Amino acid sequence: MKKAVFIFFLLGTLSVSAVERVSLEQLKSDWSKYTNQVVELTTPLVVCGSFYDSLILAPERLFCPEERAVGLADGDSTLYYALAAQNKAASIVVNCRNSYYKVRCGDRVNGLTARVTSARHFVTGKPVKTKHVAQDKLPKPKKGELRVVGANIENYFADLGGYATKRTTPEQQAMKTTKLVKALKAMHADIIACCEMQVGDKAPTMLLEALNRGGKKYAYVSMPLPNMDRIGGCFIYNTERVRVYAEPLSAYKDTASHYYGRMFAVGFEEIASGEKLIIGVNHLKSKRAGRGNYDTHLKRMDNADSLLAMLPQAVKVFGDEDILLLGDYNCYTQEGPIQKIVRAGYADLLPLGGESDYSYCFKGELGYLDRCFGNASMSKQVVRVRPWHINADWYYSHGAYKMKDKSLHRYSDHEPIIVDIKMSSR
């Protein structure tokens, strides 16, 4: 028996000694040399993507090529392909046993030990040890500032069982409401421009019942449409701080249009100062990857045209020139619809939050799908714009709901865009 134990110990020692410490650059120079070998990576890595049975790791976070280059649907894609190739070359994929709902993108990984199975691919029978970075904290708005938030709340429906909610249980719906209420309250927002709220009055009423528990501080305004299995837009606002002074105006004339209730503007007045502003909530057509994106790209260009055509009318109807545009535009920074809006005189205010920031993470790549634009007079009054990182870095599923996680994290797959404004008369 002692002999057997000694042999087992010796084999274990040999196995450990066989692990070679190498850098990621050494592996890249000749993947075949290390294939089927267990290695320990000396290169510090960061989690770029977390999935059911694997992690995407790289020395630093990866950005979607269309954040920095003209995309496939817009014409010249030379730089796009170069950036895509760089992202692929910089990253590795590790099949592992991590509890995917506990790993967050941005987590640090040091001393990864795993077997190389092919170029850029590793496998380990154990969980990869990750270290959380500090949670993002959101300060309250300063005295005298109005806080406006753009938030995609990811298929918030009162009626379950439709296309968007066929896999959502009442328990998950209740947990989502709990998380969403916590997040909205933590934002200290005066106005919240929501995307992906069920069209009609059932969903906003359900949310406000939870949000107003113990008082009647918040109200909502959306396009007057019957309840249906379709996502739309909705404004939630603090009645003690602002009031709606005009009926919402849609970017689409046809009430049957899929976009009638998800692209519209509302006029708000700050009660304390009497200053007014126009806020648009816009949810452009969702996209497809690669060349399949071209048809949806044309629809987004049409969405942008309809939005720009509506805004001069909004100035006349609402009697004010300050325009702030929020929402999920389903476009990265260098894509056609975004550049069209900028060329029309609406400044992209997101660089105020940092050029290397993001609101969305897809397949390990970061970018801004959620936007904030302001015309000249509005931009002068915006003092701060930033995403709040509480959603996009978590695994894309409702796994947290299954774990009864009642935190405010991962109520959606998009980050909210926080905008602080110092209202002033011209």
Image (tube, rainbow, N blue to C red):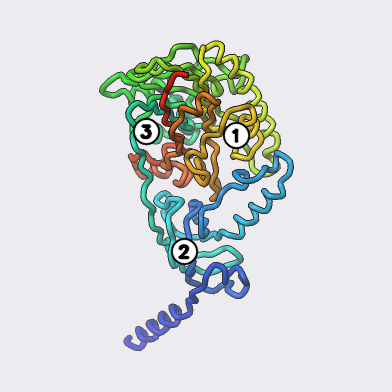
Mark 2 crowd level (few <14, some 14–19, many ≥20, 10 Å Cα): some
Q: Which mark is residue 187?
A: 3
Q: Which mark is residue 44?
A: 2
> Relative to 76, is 362 on the left or the right?
left
Q: Residue furthest left?
A: 214
Dots 2, 1 in contact, CB < 8 A: no
Disc on the earlier residue, 3 or 2: 2
Q: Is residue 410 visible?
A: yes
Element assignment for label 2: loop
Mark 1 crowd level (few <14, some 14–19, many ≥20, 10 Å Cα): some
Towards the viewer: 240 or 329: 240
- At 36% from the left and 45% from the top, the residue drawn is 403
Can you give x and y, in whole percent of width and height, for residue 382 in the image? 46, 30
According to the picture, the residue beneath numbered tag 1 turns out to be 286
Can you give x and y, in whole percent of width and height, for residue 260 in the image? 58, 19
Towards the viewer: 146 or 45: 146
